[in-house]
Image (tube, coloured by chain):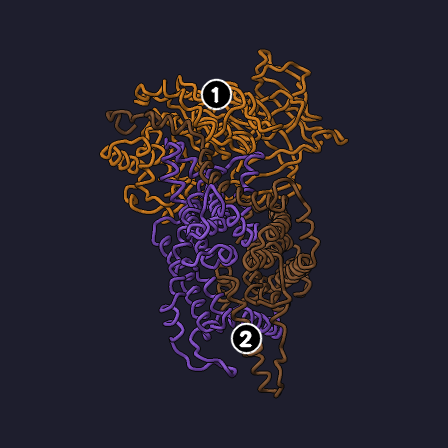
């Protein structure tokens, strides 16, 4: 629809294809290409092989994969629990207090990640709590950054839940805890899973705060990629980037699969 | 009822546990997230603001802060940040709107694949695009090599990557999906019959886009645009990876002051200024989302 | 979603008082429980949704709350369920004041329009939910689930997920789920509105059968569909603008609606406006003067001569043939009222047809023989609808026909200052 003429449609689609290819397909393809390249002197790379990947896994950057995964999973798990608790508490509430808390839990998403890093650096390099130089401070930074996102996703999920289904549970005699356990959380599960999946993805790509905080023994993938490319190891950097992309996508797919495998389809039963 | 012989069921809420649970209001859940937020977010942020306002000293002393804010490097970083953010946002809005219109109303094979490809970038790190651009448009990149071989030029003819333009192009790529998403949602709720009726009344595509699609998309454009503005002001990875000497933005200035120069007081002042700007933009975003009728303002 | 007070908060806090009442075995044996509204008002800010509502549903009775949307009927039902807190007034179930009691402590069965089945639980798990919430022992749960599903004819679907069921089947499961907990009362909130016409008729019969099988179950049935109300309800409460407009048995309300709104809402009666011009000796019958037209009807309100009044008459009580016309009678049957009208519209519905007639200046009642008195008077603008089996020959628009009705079928109603 919209464009009925054959020529007009061809022109529009041609331009669209060009934009999508240049902006999105080409960058992804080129990174993958570079990840397998040994040399790139002419237009196209040469000496293709797995050398960059073996180099990554044999050297320090390999540890970055582990650091990123642990950081992402830990920070996202805490963010999910805290975000769910916050979203449940603020649900259906009204008034200035609720609005203020809502704003507070969203605020980390407004703060530049570098500033989050700086703030944690300033706060925990002095007594009473000394965390500077630990892996924990990196996890904390990632928690702060993904917390707003987890809270937002769970809140949005809660708003999608059919209210009458929960009311029905209540009228059938379910206590608040029973209803939460048997009805609200199961219905929320797809949203929780999606929130968790994207939180981990967000955390795995985090660079700003991590750059400010990371201790020598806890270098995440993005920091490692920057270090590699900064000193000219662009192909190894690309290989690690491909690993990062793959890890992110595999993780997202796994989360999606896990939810779909479960019986919880957060779909409303009514046909109306 | 069917069998009156069965004993009546115990009434719910009978046990003490149930009583306690019932008496505990649901809002008690807020204690954990609130405590976490206070400890690892509010307290550190307050320290940064405190540091900025006292200049590292004991009492209130805005002298150092004002000196930083008056310095040439801060001014440059601020103008750079705003210029790049505005240009990127404008680019995102234009490309995002065009893509949304085509993806929603001009069916073609591979449409869903294209949409998925673009949306994948929401989950991927921002610097990825910069890295790819150096291979594509860098001085020794594919495009320049091809052009040099074709024209025999001695110098790379395409030289925009290591400037604000490189940053803007990368940010447009990375943040267009954030505009595309609310736009697609807005178009999906628009009644397609409106377009058909308009066409049957003689309207051509440009008029339909201008008179029907644009007004329908306006709230989503405002929301997506203000989100873009916020994210591009805060963007760090892209600028860091481009590593152009002349392109310093506020987040990069915070980083270089703190990490490369160990000048924490200055970093705190710059971070505070950046924070004020970001929170202002966030307020704008919330207002736009509120106007869009959406309940929650979740980023991403 | 309407502004529903957060019941998880205040309702739950208010629950403890009920605990002193409930430990005695919940009274739900053979004897049903009554539902009693006592001056219940519900206000949201300046908006009054329910106003001084008083109604008692007797044990084992089905009362239909009938009214247009926005009349407060669903609010009344939700006040019984506990999802709406009355601004003032009290709600009783049996002898127990449940006004401040949390919904989950009321022991109520509730069925709503869109079924609200738990989408992540099987049919059996849905039905078992209320029992498990009460920590009923396993054997009892299994027995009750089987019983309840059998009651609605859904035994074969116990393992299915709700999304694999049709709307009608989902609603049966919803009913089974409500009945499994042996509720003291059953609340049905537009239970059939989401179903298509044929399934709806079938389900009306089902619910009727269900009530015959569980005759002690007290049912409050909210609907905007007069057919459902007339078929199922022992008594009908007609609601309008948050107030109770009429309450009586279905037959009485239909035969003698107490006011204009009831007459028009239940059975779409013709209502004409005039003045009482004459009364029968005992005052039980009255004649209305409507312009040049004279119409007689029962006068249950005992309106005096000269009073402004309305007369309500069902379309199907108007016939072209003479009512009570015995074989030997050639003229008007004794007492039948004769009116003339010009056909302005014919609406054919298959088994019947509805004629719309303009009551022209030539028309008259029994007292005025049909003299052509000129000039447009009130009845020139008045219209009347008449439903009858379709005529062999199609009616011609513009034709003048004569209609008759038995004055006992018409009801003289008090005039209302404000018209809806």
Q: Please say if C137 is above or below A127.
A: above
- Circle 2 is placed at which residue position? B136
Task: Let me know if residue C406 appears in the view.
Answer: no
Q: Which mark is residue C151?
A: none
Q: Which chain does the numbered disc 2 sit on?
A: B
Chain letter of the brown region:
B
Is A149 left, or right, of B213 in this rendering?
left
Element under disc 2: helix
Q: Are marks 1 and 2 on the same chain?
A: no
Q: Position of residue A269 (x, y in %)?
A: 41, 45
Q: Which mark is residue C37?
A: 1
Chain letter of the purple region:
A
Element under disc 1: strand
Q: Position of residue A39 (x, y in %)?
A: 46, 80
Q: Position of residue C98 (x, y in %)?
A: 43, 22
**Which of the pair C346/B293 is nearer the observer?**
B293
Task: Let me know if residue A86 appears in the view.
Answer: yes
On the image, which quarter does residue A217 sit in? bottom left
């Amino acid at each position: 629809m919209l464009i009925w003429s054959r020529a007009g449609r061809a022109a529009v689609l041609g331009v669209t294809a060009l934009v999508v290819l240049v902006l999105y397909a080409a960058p992804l393809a080129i990174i993958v290409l570079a990840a397998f390249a040994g040399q790139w002197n002419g237009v196209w790379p040469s000496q293709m092989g797995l050398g960059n990947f073996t180099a990554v896994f044999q050297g320090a950057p390999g540890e970055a994969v582990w650091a990123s995964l642990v950081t992402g999973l830990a920070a996202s798990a805490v963010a999910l629990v805290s975000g769910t608790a916050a979203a449940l508490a603020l649900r259906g509430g009204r008034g200035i207090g609720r609005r203020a808390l809502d704003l507070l839990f969203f605020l980390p998403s407004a703060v530049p990640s570098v500033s989050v890093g700086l703030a944690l650096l300033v706060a925990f390099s002095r007594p009473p709590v000394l965390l500077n130089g630990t892996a924990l401070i990196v996890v904390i930074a990632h928690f702060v950054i993904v917390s707003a996102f987890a809270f937002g996703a769970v809140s949005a999920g809660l708003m999608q839940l059919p209210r009458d289904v929960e009311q029905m549970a209540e009228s059938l005699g379910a206590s608040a805890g029973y209803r939460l356990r048997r009805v609200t959380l199961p219905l929320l599960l797809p949203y929780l899973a999606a929130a968790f999946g994207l939180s981990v993805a967000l955390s795995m790509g985090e660079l700003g705060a991590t750059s400010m905080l990371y201790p020598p023994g806890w270098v995440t993938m993005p920091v490692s990629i920057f270090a590699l490319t900064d000193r000219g190891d662009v192909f190894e950097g690309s290989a690690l980037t491909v690993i990062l992309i793959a890890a992110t996508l595999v993780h997202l797919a796994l989360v999606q699969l896990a939810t779909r495998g479960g019986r919880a389809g957060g779909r409303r039963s009514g046909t109306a | 009822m069917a069998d009156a012989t069965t004993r009546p069921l115990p009434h719910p809420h009978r046990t003490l546990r149930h009583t306690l649970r019932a008496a505990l209001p649901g809002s008690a859940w807020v204690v954990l997230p609130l405590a976490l937020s206070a400890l690892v977010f509010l307290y550190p942020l307050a320290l940064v603001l405190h540091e900025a306002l006292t200049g590292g000293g004991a009492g209130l002393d805005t002298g150092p802060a004002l000196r930083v804010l008056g310095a040439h490097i801060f001014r440059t970083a601020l103008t750079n940040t705003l210029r790049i953010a505005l240009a990127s946002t404008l680019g995102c809005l234009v490309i995002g709107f065009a893509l949304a219109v085509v993806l929603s109303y001009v069916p073609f094979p591979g449409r869903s694949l294209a949409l998925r490809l673009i949306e994948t970038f929401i989950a991927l790190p921002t610097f990825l695009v910069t890295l790819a651009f150096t291979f594509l448009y860098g001085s020794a990149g594919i495009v320049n090599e091809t052009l040099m071989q074709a024209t025999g030029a001695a110098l790379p003819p395409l030289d925009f990557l290591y400037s604000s333009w490189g940053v803007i192009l990368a940010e447009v790529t990375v943040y267009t999906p954030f505009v595309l998403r609310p736009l697609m949602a807005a178009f999906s709720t628009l009644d397609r019959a409106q377009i058909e009726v308009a066409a049957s009344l003689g309207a051509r595509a440009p008029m339909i886009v201008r008179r029907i699609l644009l007004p329908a998309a306006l709230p989503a454009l405002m929301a997506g645009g203000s989100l873009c503005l916020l994210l591009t002001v805060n963007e760090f990875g892209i600028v860091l990876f481009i590593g152009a000497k002349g392109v310093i933005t506020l987040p990069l200035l915070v980083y270089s002051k703190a990490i490369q120069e160990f000048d924490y007081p200055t970093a705190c002042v710059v971070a505070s200024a950046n924070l004020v700007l970001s929170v202002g933009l966030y307020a704008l975003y919330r207002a736009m989302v509120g106007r869009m009728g959406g309940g929650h303002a979740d980023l991403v | 979603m309407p502004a529903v007070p957060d019941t998880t908060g205040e309702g739950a806090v208010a629950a403890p008082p009920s605990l002193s009442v409930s430990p005695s075995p919940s009274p739900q044996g053979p004897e049903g429980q009554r539902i009693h509204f006592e001056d219940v008002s519900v206000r949201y800010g300046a908006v009054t949704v329910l106003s001084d509502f008083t109604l008692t549903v007797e044990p084992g009775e089905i009362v239909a709350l009938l009214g247009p949307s926005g009349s407060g009927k669903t609010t009344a039902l939700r006040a019984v369920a506990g999802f709406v807190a009355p601004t003032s007034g009290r709600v009783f179930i049996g002898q127990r004041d449940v006004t401040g009691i949390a919904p989950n402590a009321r022991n109520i069965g509730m069925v709503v329009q869109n079924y609200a089945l738990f989408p992540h639980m099987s049919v059996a798990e849905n039905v078992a939910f209320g029992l498990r919430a009460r920590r009923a022992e396993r054997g009892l749960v299994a027995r009750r689930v089987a019983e309840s599903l059998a009651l609605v004819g859904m035994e074969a679907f116990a393992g299915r997920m709700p999304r694999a069921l049709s709307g009608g089947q989902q609603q049966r499961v919803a009913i089974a789920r409500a009945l499994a907990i042996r509720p003291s009362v059953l609340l049905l909130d537009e239970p059939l509105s989401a179903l298509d016409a044929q399934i709806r008729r079938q389900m009306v019969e089902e619910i009727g059968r269900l009530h015959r099988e569980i005759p002690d179950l007290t049912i409050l049935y909210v609907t905007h569909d007069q057919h459902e109300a007339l078929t199922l309800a022992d008594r009908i409460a007609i609601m309008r603008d948050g107030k109770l407009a009429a309450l009586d048995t279905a037959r009485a309300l239909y035969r003698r609606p107490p006011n204009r709104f009831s007459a028009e809402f239940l059975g779409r009666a013709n209502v004409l406006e005039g003045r009482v011009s004459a009364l029968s000796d005992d005052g039980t019958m009255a004649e209305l003067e409507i312009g040049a037209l004279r119409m007689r009807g029962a006068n249950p309100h005992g309106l005096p001569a000269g009073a402004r009044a309305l007369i309500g008459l069902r379309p199907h009580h108007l016939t072209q043939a003479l009512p009570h016309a015995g074989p030997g009678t050639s003229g008007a049957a004794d007492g039948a009222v004769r009116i003339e009208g010009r056909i302005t519209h014919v609406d054919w519905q298959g088994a019947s047809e509805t004629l719309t007639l303009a009551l022209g200046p030539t028309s008259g009642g029994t007292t005025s023989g049909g003299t052509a008195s000129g000039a447009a008077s009130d009845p020139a603008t008045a219209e009347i609808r008449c439903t009858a089996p379709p005529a062999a020959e199609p009616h011609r628009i513009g034709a003048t026909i004569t209609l008759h009705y038995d004055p006992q079928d018409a009801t003289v109603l008090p005039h209302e200052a404000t018209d809806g």
